[in-house]
Amino acid sequence: MEHPILRLLQKPSRIVLGFMSGTSADGVDAALCRIAGSGLTTQVEQLAFAFVPFSPEVRAEILRLASGESACAADFCRINFLLGQLYCEAGEAVCRKAGIAKEQVDLIGNHGQTLWHIPVEEEYLGRRQRSTLQLGEDALLAECFGCPVAGDFRVRDMAAGGLGAPLVPYTEFLLYRSPDEWVALQNIGGIGNVTVLPANCTLEQVFAFDTGPGNMVIDAVISRLTHGEKTYDDGGAMAAQGTVHPTLLQWMLEDPYLAKKPPKTTGRELYGPAYVNRLMEKAGALKVAPADLMSTVTRFTAETISCGLRRFSPRMPQRLIVGGGGSLNRCLMEHIRQVLPECRVMTNEDLGLDSSAKEAVAFAVLANETIFASCNNAPAATGARHPVVMGKISL
């Protein structure tokens, strides 16, 4: 029987599915792509994209398990297989949308759902270590689609001393670098992360880091204010009705994470329920009106992006391309333009691309690199000691 990986390497192009479910825990992004080549010769055509939301019950369980509060091993066991099933359903949905039979899929790249991430070395049972946990069983995808699956990408970078994040800078280097401009790519999911590509850069010159909360705090605050009726501020509508509260914003900007030098990464472990509790208490003490609170936390996300670029980029990029769900928040985008007047702030749509699909496409590309045994991390971004091939393969 022909080796399944060898067969893929010999094809002129491959149909690749990429999956991402982020820290917002709102659902599954599934992108179907045609990928030719690898490395610097990579060419990507997005065939279809689908977002399949989690049910309120599934989202609540993910957030419970990702809160750091008490849970048992059986819970993680169950959610791992449940997420695998949901990724299968999302993959089938995007194939239907593209008019492609699932048997035509050659390869899958699956980031999984982050349940906990410990990027800073800690002592545990007499050892020093970093660790991370992404769930969503790859074997279920391999069984459903009958093709190789590359998943659990972060752990290989961490084994080499990296933070295991951010992971998309490698794909951004392949797809967005410019011969004559400094380009920054800001993704705004639950967490914000930026990649800076100097003009005509090599991979070694690419740097990236998590800027801080993206939508995570905005979503949590509007959920608190509406008693769960809303889980996100659609288009920034509520924030646009308010005014930024300067005292509360200044308190938020004193966050020590913002001053920490890259490489750095963060997540729900820092900006989860405990952070939101402190924020709501501070806003209550200052008697901040609900719309003003929404305006302030939205401005804060924009300010974290500005802080990151001004403090840590050798020069201000000429272009800032914003992707992820946050790019759909018109109020947030306006705040970003205000805090970065010297940048041409745009979205992926301005380039004819799809902001919503960007991270899912990235994991399709990372999987393609995995099967070619191409190093697909960016050590300058993650802090790894050397380049590695990320992705465990299920056949």
Image (cartoon, rainbow, N blue to C red):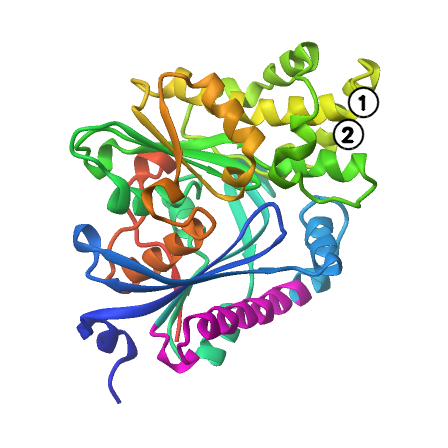
For the C terminus, give its image quadrant. bottom left
> Which residue shows up at 63% across the image and 12% down it?
250
Q: Is residue 277 left or right of residue 47?
A: right
Q: What residue sits right under mark 2 in the picture?
A: 277
On the image, the x and y values in percent for residue 24 come to 61, 46
Per the image, is 192 magenta?
no
Q: Quadrant of residue 340?
A: top left
- Residue neighbourhood size for the residue with mark 2, other residues' Cα within 10 Å, grouped as few (<14), some (14–19), many (≥20): some
Task: Report the magenta stretch's main SS.
Answer: helix
Q: Is residue 6 left or right of residue 227?
A: left
Circle 2 — which element?
A: helix
Q: Check if mark 2's residue and mark 1's residue have beta carbons within 8 Å.
A: yes
Q: Between 137 and 98, which is closer to the camera in this rendering?
A: 98
Span highlighted in magenta in the image: 78-106
Q: Quadrant of residue 244?
A: top right
On the image, the x and y values in percent for residue 141 come to 49, 73
Question: Visible in this render: residue 31?
Answer: yes
On the image, the x and y values in percent for residue 79 come to 66, 63
On the image, the x and y values in percent for residue 245 come to 69, 14
Q: Mark number for residue 215?
A: none
Q: What residue sits right under mark 1 in the picture?
A: 281
Q: Is residue 228 above or below residue 296?
A: below
> Which residue shows up at 28% across the image and 65% down it?
371
> Which residue shows up at 79% across the image and 46% down it?
229
